[in-house]
Structures are given as structure tokens and as C-alpha cells.
């Protein structure tokens, strides 16, 4: 399975994602510059974390217009797998590939620490290898991770099981103590209705080895690989 990691000016987690895929999962991966209009024959695209274009104007608002986003949108609409991590999630929201928007964290401070998120649905290519209700320890590093949307969109996300990850306490409790940024309904990550595009604020690529204090993020990348391999066998 070949991955493509998009690089924007200001990306700073692109190499982390590249390392997780190439050195830990041993899958082919290639960097894709934001001005490219081709996706290097990738089977899955990752929009990494960082500060694309310095996060000027609004997080993800400028990156959304990078030339690479046209083929990414076309790829996504054709069923291609797209994962946005942190700043990548913000870009997917700005591009309209996922619903909702991001606001400043409650407290108006940048947060960089490990948090706990619960896998809410395993019927996605991004959580296929996880258990429903599984608690993952994954770091966050953001200033605008406070997910919000209108009441109807929230109702749709809940009805269609599009809320893939929720912030929680280590024991799985749904209360404010486990929500680091004020995100609506404790949302840490969502997917689109077709379930092939997902975004999350925590950084799974920074939690792929025990030396990083957690390898829980691997389940997301392994899910993508297993989903693709299963699909490839079915069509062979």
C-alpha cells in the first residue's frame, strides 16, 4: 500500500508521518509538495500536522487553496482514503471535505501533552483494527482544536456514526476533565458520511513506538493498511 504525505510550507509533522509509515509499518510512502497537481499514484493521502502557511488568516484557510487540494478533493470524492491529522484536519474542514470548524482552545492556550481518546466506531478504514470503546493514549499539540458545528450537523454526525474519536479520561468517562480544548461533544475526530475521509486533532504518528510513551497511534495506520489489503484481495 502506497501512502502520500502532503507537505505544505509550515508542515512540521510530515517527517513523523513518513517515519511511522516507512520505518514502523514498512509501507511505501512518498512526500507530495503542496504545489503538485498529482498524487504520486498513492492509495492513501495524509495531510499532516503543522502550521500550513503559518496559519495566517485562519488555520487551514490558505492551504485549502494549494494546487494539491484539487486532486485530493477529486481523490476523496472517488472513494480514496484521506486522513487529516491536526492541521490536516483543519484543512479538511476548510476544504469542505469534512463538516464543522475549529475555534481557539478553551483557555486560549496552546496545548501539547498526551490525552486519551476513545474509539467510538470501528466501521471505518481508520479504525478497522481497533476495538469499539478502546482507549488510546495519543499526544495533542494545537492552539485551535476546539471543534464546533451547528446543531443539525452535530445531530447528523451522531446519527450517522461519524464521530470516530472522543476525548475521554483514562478510565473512559465522558466529562470535562477529559476534554483538553472544549471541543463540542468531546469530539476528537470525525469522518465523512462515505467513511473514506477522516480527521483527528491528536497525533497518532507521534505514538507509534513505546519509546514515545505510547504506540497506540499505530492502530490507525494499521487499520488503513488492513482495509486496503482486504479490498485488494477482494478485487483480485
Image (cartoon, grey):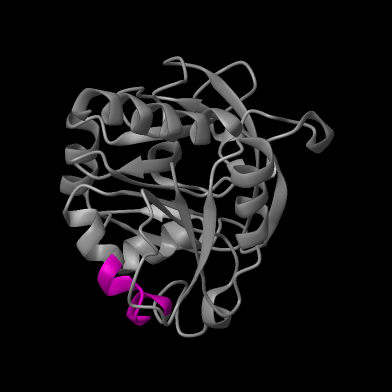
Q: Quadrant of residue 110?
A: bottom right
Report the residue that reaches farthest toward the right.
Answer: 211
Q: Position of residue 178 (x, y in %)?
A: 59, 32
Q: Is residue 212 left or right of residue 94?
A: right
Quarter of the image where the N terminus is located: top left
The residue sitting at 36% across, 74% down in the picture is 68
- Is residue 183 found inside the magenta-colored segment of the image? no
Q: Is 67 part of what is drawn in magenta?
A: yes
Task: Say which residue appears at 69% left-offset and 29% top-offset.
Answer: 215
Residue 186 position in % (x across, y down): 45, 37
Question: Which residue is at a point 35% across and 24% down the rendered structure image?
Answer: 121
Q: Position of residue 17 (x, y in %)?
A: 60, 51
The residue range painted magenta reads 63-71
Decide: is 119 above or below 200: above
**Picture residue at 52% right of the left edge, 49% below the top:** 201
Q: Is 195 in front, or is 93?
A: 195
Magenta stretch prevailing secondary structure: helix
Amino acid at each position: 500500500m502506497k501512502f502520500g504525505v502532503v507537505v505544505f510550507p509550515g508542515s512540521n509533522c510530515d517527517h513523523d508521518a513518513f517515519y511511522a509509515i516507512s520505518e514502523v509499518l514498512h509501507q511505501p510512502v512518498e512526500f507530495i509538495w503542496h504545489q503538485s497537481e498529482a498524487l504520486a499514484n498513492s492509495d492513501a493521502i495524509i495531510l499532516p500536522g503543522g502550521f500550513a502557511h503559518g496559519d495566517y488568516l485562519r488555520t487551514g484557510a490558505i492551504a485549502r487553496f494549494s494546487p494539491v487540494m484539487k486532486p485530493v478533493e477529486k481523490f476523496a470524492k472517488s472513494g480514496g482514503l484521506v486522513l487529516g491529522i491536526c492541521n490536516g484536519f483543519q484543512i479538511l474542514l476548510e476544504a469542505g471535505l469534512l463538516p464543522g470548524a475549529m475555534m481557539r482552545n478553551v483557555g486560549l492556550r496552546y496545548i501539547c501533552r498526551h490525552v486519551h481518546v476513545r474509539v467510538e466506531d470501528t466501521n471505518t478504514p481508520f479504525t478497522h483494527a481497533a476495538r469499539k470503546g478502546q482507549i488510546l493514549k495519543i499526544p495533542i499539540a494545537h492552539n485551535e482544536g476546539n471543534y464546533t458545528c451547528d446543531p443539525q450537523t452535530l445531530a447528523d454526525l451522531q446519527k450517522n456514526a461519524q464521530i470516530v474519536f472522543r476525548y475521554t479520561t483514562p478510565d473512559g468517562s465522558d466529562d470535562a476533565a477529559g476534554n483538553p480544548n472544549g471541543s463540542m461533544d468531546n469530539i476528537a475526530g470525525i469522518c465523512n458520511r462515505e467513511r473514506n475521509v477522516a480527521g483527528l486533532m491528536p497525533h497518532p504518528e507521534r505514538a507509534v513506538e513505546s519509546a514515545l510513551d505510547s504506540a497506540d497511534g499505530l492502530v490507525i495506520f494499521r487499520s488503513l493498511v488492513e482495509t486496503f489489503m482486504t479490498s485488494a484481495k477482494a478485487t483480485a
